[in-house]
Image (cartoon, helix red, strand yellow):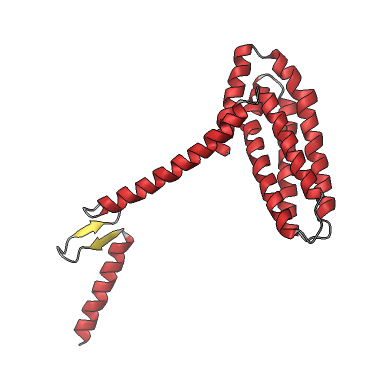
Amino acid sequence: MATRTQSQSNRTTSNRSRSKRGETQDQRTGQSRSAFSWGENTGPLLGAALAGVAIGFAANYGRKALMQGMEAAAGDWDEILAAEHDMALAIFDKMLATDESQTFKRKMLLMKLTHALDKHAHQEEMVVYPALREANQTTDADHLEGEHGYIKTYIYELNEMGPDGTNWLEKVREFRALVSRHAHMEEEQVFPPFKQALTEEQNARVTSLVNRDGFWMA
Ligand SMILES: [Fe+2]
Ligand SMILES: [Fe+2]
């Protein structure tokens, strides 16, 4: 009896160590096979899973293509970014028009704003600011990128405060003022001289890269 228990215990240990290595014992053949290898029966299941992924990808691609089309029609990179500034400021205005009873609306608007600012910051940080540094406008690029950090800080604070926080409107007002100041600096001080120094080809390249980055972030 003791021997049998001992033997069962050994078998359990052995199975456990095998499963740790990603292997299972095939019940019919007694052969070991790895969970990471594609067995004969995984074909249809894998096919269905891949089809699902393909449909999801196509739907997302279509949605992104639509957003991209809308953006591509907006013009040069600086015009695209200026339109996004206006869009973000318009979301702020809707937020400022809410009261503390409209918690769901506040949450939705903050989500929309977060997504818009995330996409926008990504385009600037991955394309425009590196191009500015390449053109020796490093101080401006670093200053603007630093402000993006504070923009994220406001998003963090608003999420922590919750939509019924007593200082919610005040915090949103401060946040809007920072984004507005930042956008004006880009649109009026930093981007125009940088764009003027670009050749037509370089300008088209920056526009294409901004569009491509925005496409994947949409
Ligand atoms: Fe920016
Ligand atoms: Fe911007």
Q: Residue 23: where, in percent of width, then height?
A: 27, 59
Front residue of this view, candidates 211 and 31: 211
Q: Residue at x 19, y 83 (%)?
A: 3
Residue 210 seen from this side: no
Give the image quarter of residue 69: top right
Estimate the x, y position of residue 100 in percent, counting from the top left. 80, 60
| 78 to 200, vertically: above or below | below
What is the quadrant of the C terminus in the image? Answer: top right
Query: Residue 157, relative to residue 180: is it above or below?
Result: below
Q: Is residue 120 left or right of residue 217?
A: right
**Residue at 27% across, 51% down:** 44
In the picture, measured across the screen, residue 122 lies left or right of residue 15, that is right
Measured from the top left, where is residue 134 in percent x and y? Answer: 64, 21
Count of marks, rendered view: 0
The quarter of the image holding the N terminus is: bottom left
Q: Is residue 119 above or below residue 81?
A: below
Q: Among all residues in the image, which is located at the extreme left?
A: 29
Q: Which residue shows up at 83% across the image and 47% down it?
A: 173
199 to the left or right of 188: left
Q: Give residue 114's position: percent from left, percent from top.
A: 67, 46
Q: Residue furthest bottom?
A: 1
For residue 102, above or below residue 185: below
Q: Nearer the viewer, residue 85 or 127?
A: 85
Residue 201 seen from this side: yes
> Relative to residue 59, is residue 32 drawn left or right?
left
Please state which of residues 204 and 55 is positioned toward the viewer in this rendering.
55
Residue at left 69%, top 24%? 78
Q: Quadrant of ligand 2?
A: top right
Residue 75, picture quadrant: top right
